[in-house]
Amino acid sequence: MVTNVEVKPKHQYRGLTQWGRIFRNLGMILPVAIFALLIFTAIFANFLAPFPYDETSLTERRLPPAWVEGGSTKHLLGTDTLGRDILSRAIYGARISLSVSLLAIAITASVGTVLGIISGYMGGRVDAFIMRITDIAMAFPGLLLAILIAVSLGPGFFTVIIALSILGWSGYARIIRGEALRVRNSDFVAQAQVIGVSPWRIMLRHIFPNILNILIIGITLSVGTMILAESAMSYLGIGIPPPMPSWGSMVSDGRNDLDRAWWISTFPGIAIGLVVLSGNFLGDWIRDKMDPRLRQM
Amino acid sequence: MREIILQVEDLRTSFFTRRGEVKAVDGVSFYVREGETFGIVGESGCGKTVTGLSLLRLLPEPAGRIVGGKIILEGTNLMELSKKAMRAYRGRMISMILQDPMTSLNPVYPIGDQIAESVRLHQNLADEHMVEQEVISALRLLRIPSPEMILRQYPFQLSGGMRQRVVGAIAMSCHPRVLIADEPTTALDATIQAQYMALFKDVQQKTNVAIIFITHDFGVIANMCHRVGVMYAGKIIETAPTREIFNAPRHPYTSALINSVPRLDRKDDRLYSIEGQPPSLMNLPPGCRFAPRCTVVQEICREQEPPEVDIGNGHSVSCWKVK
């Protein structure tokens, strides 16, 4: 006997409630909110910080955060070895850390992507030439070059960016070249050639969008690398000159006091972690949205 | 008689590898008339696809290179064009459909954009509305249902047969005079294949385009082509009207090839197959390239290459047996 079986859809995607929709896009809302907050903080640091970043107080050295015994609400996140307010320094630190890393990433990612796509698409001698330069850039000791640059240009904001960018593009170039090579051998590139599309247009219109997800993953992952590289430079005294704080240098400052004043390193460390994590979540979300196969679901 | 649109004379294409020169196409000559379909048939690796790519001058550089010959398209020798001028010819005058519809479309753009790319490139249209009209008419030409809707869809939303039609629409969007179809039906199943071939004939009737149909399938040849060139080891060894190829093949290779097609009207215990392997294109035999596998081989076949003999009726053969 045949019975009429009514098939009910398991999930009704179209009829999501407002809360459901918000929950599904949490991967975007949360990191964007964090980034927005941090950028806002960086821009308006002067108004938000309760103290100047360089105001020392020898009587209030290594003060713990407000909620720990011995802490006071005057210094919410405590003070460092010189009695400077950690909250204020972290707020100012957002400025340096974010601008240095974002600028350096913008430079390295663009240069690396352009070189990688040209290398992968053109092949032959062009490829060999670009890849040998990439090899050299990768083999070069980065910190040594950074010191050299800092010595010859003098420490400062742009010195740090130049030092981070001058070798940092090589990783992008390598990864993007591999991807470009994969995409260039696909039939739709051949189809584009068949209808007479020029090489530059093929690179821009057909190769670039198809490697974008890899690029975005690379960018989000390098946010952390860049902030850490900047802090390494600060630690060596070739970064942003003190007393201007960056999260990296704040972490380094607290290294010797980890056993008795954990908060000096911890709070800027949390800030770095938050940025890296937000970057990764945001990257995942963008990648999913850009893949048309996932978009319609 | 209709005008000859494309004339290929003594085309030679080689791949220069570390181990030596591979003569993938070694002196191929043929022509196609307006509104005619010329089939190139042969086994895998005989140089069919390389011939097709050579006509567009799209070989994988730097290894592949056209080393000689003329490709005359409506009086212009494509070999003499600059790279830029050649690009302007591609898609507008001579176009190609690639084998695999699953991967011939860029996954990140709606298909309307991909057809529009060719339209924008080759036709100076004033505004986007006219571009869209052209795109829709190209989709209509390939009988794609509700083109206004389809053009906003992404390739993954379409079936294989539909994608193959879209690829056809891209190729035909700028009304080329010559269309090279490189095994466009191989990736499709039998019923869709039949539909697609009927569609091709229809497109040809409407546009009068000359089609070069590359395939290894004699069934497709019988269905589609007016004339056929049989290719073996980089050379066309026999050219004839389709009916003659089937009824009166003169080259031993052609007859052997036709014999090895399974047939419903005969009871064969075993499928016929040609003994041996095609020669290495790097190291061709001195005489006829089919001599080592030929059943009626003579002394002279092993020593000298047979000349192409015109036996009338548009039928020419390169074989010492044919006089």
Image: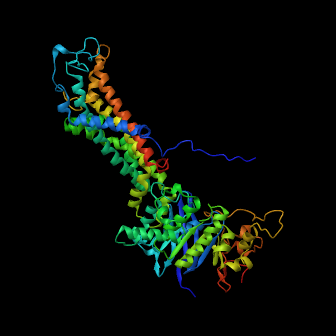
Classify A76 as above or below B228: above
Nearer to me, A251 or A267: A267
Which color mode does the image show?
A: rainbow
Give the percent coordinates (x, y) of residue A29: 37, 38
Q: Residue B200: percent from the left, percent from the top?
A: 58, 72
| In the rendered image, the vertical position of residue A104 relative to residue B196, given as above or below | above
State the residue at coordinates (35%, 44%): A169
Q: Quadrant of the N terminus of chain B?
A: bottom right
Q: Residue at x 39, y 60 (%)?
A: A201
Quadrant of residue A156 within the rendered picture: top left
Q: Is residue A238 left or right of residue B283?
A: left
Front residue (pair A147, B36): B36
Say if B98 sits above or below A138 in the image: below
The extreme top residue here reads A69
Q: Quadrant of the C terminus of chain B?
A: bottom right
Q: Is residue B113 left or right of residue B249?
A: left
* Relative vertical location of residue A291 with respect to residue B144 in this rendering, above or below: above
Residue A249 shows up from this direction: yes
Q: Is residue A167 left or right of residue A243?
A: right
Provide residue A144's location: percent of width, then percent of height. 30, 34
Can residue B82 be seen by looking at this rendering?
no
Q: Quadrant of residue B97?
A: bottom right
* Residue shown at 32% from the left, 31% from the top: A228
Q: Where, by quadrant of the figure, is residue A261 drawn? A: top left
- State how many labels appear: 0
Q: Relative to the observer, which residue lies in front, B201 or A114?
A: B201
Residue B249, given in percent of the width and then of the height, sits at 72, 77
